[in-house]
Image (tube, rainbow, N blue to C red):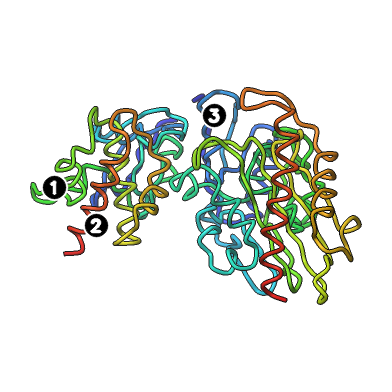
């Protein structure tokens, strides 16, 4: 049964029509055309669909849109402010921490959740926090480098 | 995903009442990290999904000597809780061994038990630490030792319309320690070849007072092995470790599958038992 729900997305209330079975991922991509959130495996194995729910990294393929009513959701579209890339986005660009880009929004949001909680993580801590986000192109070194650089930039 | 209805409930009693209307066609949604995969893969058909995560009477995580874990406590919360990490270390390690951070931000301890995977990471620790379940159903509350909960892969002893209200762990005895070791190819997002949790306590003279294992991925269910009769009064020397490893192997009935062979699992359950007991011993000796 279709219903209209209101989700708090990137600080804005957004109405979207969903069924109970609609995943948060589909509400974002198909309902609201926020296609920065990517679907990889659709089974919670790859992390490509990672968004922040109340500040915590979550696989949006494993959450129903109706479950998200009442929570604050951050997608990759919510990071840049007034045309300025977020320091994480800037660092990924500077360090060439992406190739095809499918894993990048999830990587950046998982990294944001980490830096919000722990502003200067060690490389091991970065690896631990990004272990649920798979990249099949770059390898992970440049991604770790980028998160480290963003942490330093944010600390300045 | 096939269509279903979604309903939020205000109290756990209401959840039990709604579950009772159609127990076979209704499931309680916790973290959803298994349930939504089953629904996506159409391994499960449901009339209704019941969401009690915002129920007003939901027990949380309580530590007062003993530990009680409510049904919506996330694995990430358990792994980060200082008292859990200090006193029920194997549980913090088991929680931390599941998936990745984003999975553990949603997945719950109660849900991990409800899925009843033989290879799950939290049951070995809970079994070694002597967990009991507080269940809530139409007839009220009852308690069940976790060792009696699992029946087979994906099967457990919850009655229709019954739910896990709390997972209960006793206060660890003095001079005790616990450790969970997961053997897998990767450090995250992987399923255990074998998982072994060991918990032990020492007498004041440094001999073993009690010891118990929880084994994962070596039988159709997680397995508890009580080593107290075997080890009590002994020093945990190489002979004692060998006897414990053999007891773990005897309690195992592993299978060959795509991950590894039964032969390998049988060898590793012995080795992980030795390692786990050594680690638990080191913690217990630090308290002597």
Q: Which residue is mark 1?
A: A85
Binning the other alpha carbons within 10 Å of mark 2 as few (below 14), some (14 to 19) or many (20 upward) gives many
Q: From the viewer's perspective, tell me whether residue B69 is left or right of residue A109.
A: right
Same-chain status of marks 1 and 3? no
Tag nearer the camera, 1 or 3: 1
Q: Which residue is mark 2?
A: A151
Q: Are marks 2 and 3 in contact (CB under 8 Å)?
A: no
Establish if A156 lies above or below A78.
below
- Whole-percent x and y of residue A123? 34, 52
Specify the subunit that label 1 lies on.
A
Label 2, label 3: how far apart the Cα atoms are: 39 Å
Binning the other alpha carbons within 10 Å of mark 3 as few (below 14), some (14 to 19) or many (20 upward) gives some
Q: Quadrant of residue A42?
A: top left
Establish if A53 lies above or below B175.
above
- Whole-percent x and y of residue B42? 55, 23
- Whole-percent x and y of residue A132? 42, 41
Check residue B39 in the rendering and tell me which mark sits there, or answer none. Answer: 3
Residue plotted at (80% across, 44% down): B248
Which of the two residues, B246 or A45, is positioned nearer the viewer here?
Answer: B246
Tag nearer the camera, 2 or 3: 2
Residue plotted at (54% across, 68% down): B82
Secondary structure type for disc 3 = helix
Specify the subunit that label 2 lies on.
A
Same-chain status of marks 2 and 3? no
Which of the two residues, B130 or A24, is positioned nearer the viewer here?
Answer: B130
Secondary structure type for disc 1 = loop
Quadrant that contains the N terminus of chain A: top left
């Amino acid at each position: 049964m279709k219903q209209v729900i209101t989700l708090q997305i990137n600080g804005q209330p957004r109405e979207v029509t969903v069924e109970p079975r609609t995943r948060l991922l589909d509400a974002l991509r198909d309902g609201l055309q926020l296609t920065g959130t990517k679907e990889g495996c659709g089974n919670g194995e790859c992390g490509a669909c990672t968004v922040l729910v109340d500040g915590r990294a979550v696989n949006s393929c494993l959450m129903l849109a109706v479950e998200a009513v009442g929570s604050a959701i951050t997608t990759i579209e919510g990071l840049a402010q007034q045309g300025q890339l977020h320091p994480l986005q800037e660092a990924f660009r500077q360090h060439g921490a992406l190739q095809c880009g499918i894993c990048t929004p999830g990587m950046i949001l998982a990294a944001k959740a980490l830096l919000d909680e722990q502003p200067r993580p060690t490389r091991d801590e970065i690896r631990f926090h990004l272990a649920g986000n798979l990249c099949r192109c770059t390898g992970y070194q440049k991604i770790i480098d980028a998160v480290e650089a963003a942490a330093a930039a944010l600390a300045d | 995903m096939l269509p279903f209805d979604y309903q939020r409930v205000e109290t756990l009693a209401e959840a039990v009442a709604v579950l009772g209307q159609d127990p076979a066609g209704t499931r309680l949604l916790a973290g959803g990290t298994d349930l939504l995969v089953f629904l996506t893969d159409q391994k499960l058909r449901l009339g209704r999904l019941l969401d009690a995560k915002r129920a007003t009477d939901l027990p949380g995580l309580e530590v007062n000597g003993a530990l009680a874990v409510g049904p919506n406590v996330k694995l990430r919360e358990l792994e980060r809780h200082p008292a859990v990490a200090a006193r029920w270390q194997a549980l913090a390690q088991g929680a931390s061994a599941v998936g990745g951070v984003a999975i553990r931000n949603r997945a719950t301890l109660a849900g991990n038990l409800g899925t009843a995977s033989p290879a799950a990471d939290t049951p070995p620790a809970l079994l070694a630490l002597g967990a009991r379940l507080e269940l809530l159903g139409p007839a009220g509350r009852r308690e069940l030792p976790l060792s009696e909960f699992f029946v087979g892969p994906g099967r457990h002893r919850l009655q229709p319309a019954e739910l896990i209200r709390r997972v209960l762990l006793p206060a660890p005895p003095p001079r005790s320690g616990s450790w969970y070791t997961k053997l897998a190819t990767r450090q995250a997002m992987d399923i255990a070849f074998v998982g072994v949790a060991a918990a032990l306590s020492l007498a004041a003279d440094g001999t073993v007072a009690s010891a118990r294992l929880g084994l994962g991925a070596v039988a159709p269910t997680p397995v508890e092995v009580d080593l107290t009769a075997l080890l009590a009064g002994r020093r945990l020397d190489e002979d004692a470790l060998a006897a414990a490893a053999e007891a773990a192997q005897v309690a195992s009935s592993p299978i060959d599958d795509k991950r590894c062979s039964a032969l390998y699992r049988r060898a590793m359950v012995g080795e992980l038992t030795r390692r786990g007991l050594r680690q638990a011993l080191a913690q217990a000796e630090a308290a002597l």
